[in-house]
Image (cartoon, rainbow, N blue to C red):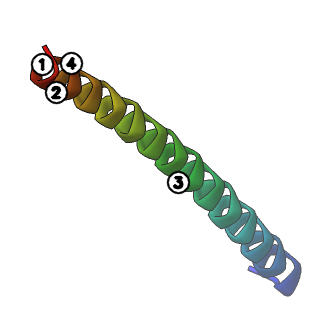
Amino acid sequence: MNEAEKERNREIAQNEAVRQTTGDVRVSVWTIVFAIIIGVVAVAIVWAWLSR
C-alpha cells in the first residue's frame, strides 16, 4: 500500500465519520421531538382528567 492509498483511505474514513455524526444528530433530534410530543399529549390527558 503506497502513501497515496493510505491518504485516500484516511479521507474516506474521515468522510464516513462526518456522515455518521450527521446521522446520529438527526436521529437524536427526531427522538427529542418525539419525546416532547408524547410529553405534551400526556400532560393534556392528565390535565383533562383532573379538570373534569
Q: Position of residue 52 (x, y in %)?
A: 13, 13
The circle drawn on residue 48 is: 4
Going by the numbered disc 4, the residue's amino acid type is Ala
Q: Crowding near pointer 3: few (<14 within 10 Å), some, many (20+)?
A: few
Lower position in the chain sequence, tag 2 or tag 3? 3
The circle drawn on residue 24 is: 3
Q: Position of residue 16 (x, y in %)?
A: 67, 60
Whether residue 45 sits left or right of residue 32 in the image: it is: left
Q: Position of residue 38 (x, y in %)?
A: 31, 30
Q: Position of residue 34 (x, y in %)?
A: 41, 34
Q: Secondary structure at mark 4?
A: helix
Give the Cα separation between the discs numbered 1 and 4. 4 Å
Whether label 4 touches label 2, CB < 8 Å: yes
Lower position in the chain sequence, tag 3 or tag 1? 3
Q: Residue at x 12, y 19 (%)?
A: 49
Whether label 2 touches label 3, CB < 8 Å: no
